Image: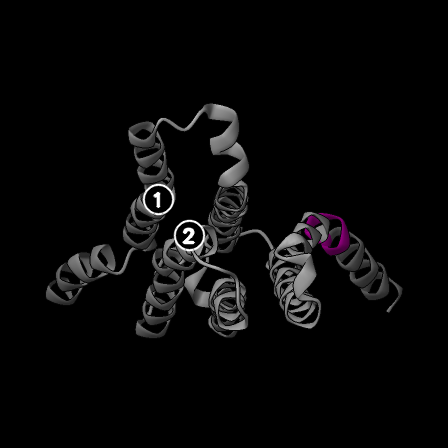
Amino acid sequence: MAARSGSAGPLQSWRSAERIKVFTDAVVAIALTLLILPLLESVSQAAHTGVGTGRFLGEHSDQLFSFAISFAVIAAFWVQHHTLFLGVEHWTGGLLLLNFCWLLTIVWLPVPTAMTGAMHPDALQKVLYLGTMLLSSLVALAMYALLERRPTLRAPDAPRTRPGRVGCLVLAGLFALALALCLAIPALGYLPTLLLALTRTIARRITRHLDQRDARR
């Protein structure tokens, strides 16, 4: 029995969710930093050609807008991931795989972000840009589903998953709606992404409705 107990310690330490959280935080921080690199390159080019500040801001308004949107989205995704892992103590192979898939979407996002600022917008570009964000939300939903099927991975006093899961679902829906509007009405550009500001309000109302419905049962 003593040998078994002794061998369980290193395994529990290896499967600690803290390892995932720390690693994920580092990757997200790098992705946020990568977003600024195309802008720095544009500033360098403008400086060499003698372009003034006002003209630079006007010529690169799309690039600045996509940078701001992507920064806000990745920050929201990080908060979403932090909420998802609250109370998670251990990981399984499935959770680890889904987390790496989620990180893949985060690391990839600076690429379509750079495209939106440097290239003429077309349908494929919009699919790559907003589709990446939609995929990230869907992967987060898959992680929520896994954690709800494996409650032993979470601490007994872990916060309930409903608010975060609903918020994730709403975010995915708004990404899908924004993508549909961008493709259906090209003149809008990426303005439909501003719909994402409604995520928190909608999610709160849905969560409150579900809680009230459960209370009546």
Rendered location of residue 47, percent (x, y):
32, 28
- Range shown magenta: 199-203
Task: Judge from the rendering whether residue 41 lies leftward or rightward of residue 212; answer left or right.
Answer: left
Please provide percent x and percent y for residue 111. 36, 57
Closer mark to the observer between disc 1 and disc 2: 2
Q: How far across and down, in percent of the image, does residue 169 sit?
A: 64, 65
Magenta-span inclusion, residue 176: no
Kindly identify the amino acid type of the residue bearing the numbered disc 2: Ala
Query: Who is closer to the viewer here, 165 or 175?
Result: 175
Q: How is the image coloured?
A: one colour
Split into 4 quadrants, where in the image is the N terminus? Answer: bottom left
Give the residue number, with chain letter if any, for mark 2. 118
Q: Residue furthest left?
A: 3
**Picture quarter containing residue 112?**
bottom left
Q: Which residue is mark 1?
A: 38
> How many residues crowd mark 1 within 10 Å: few (<14), some (14–19), many (20+)?
many
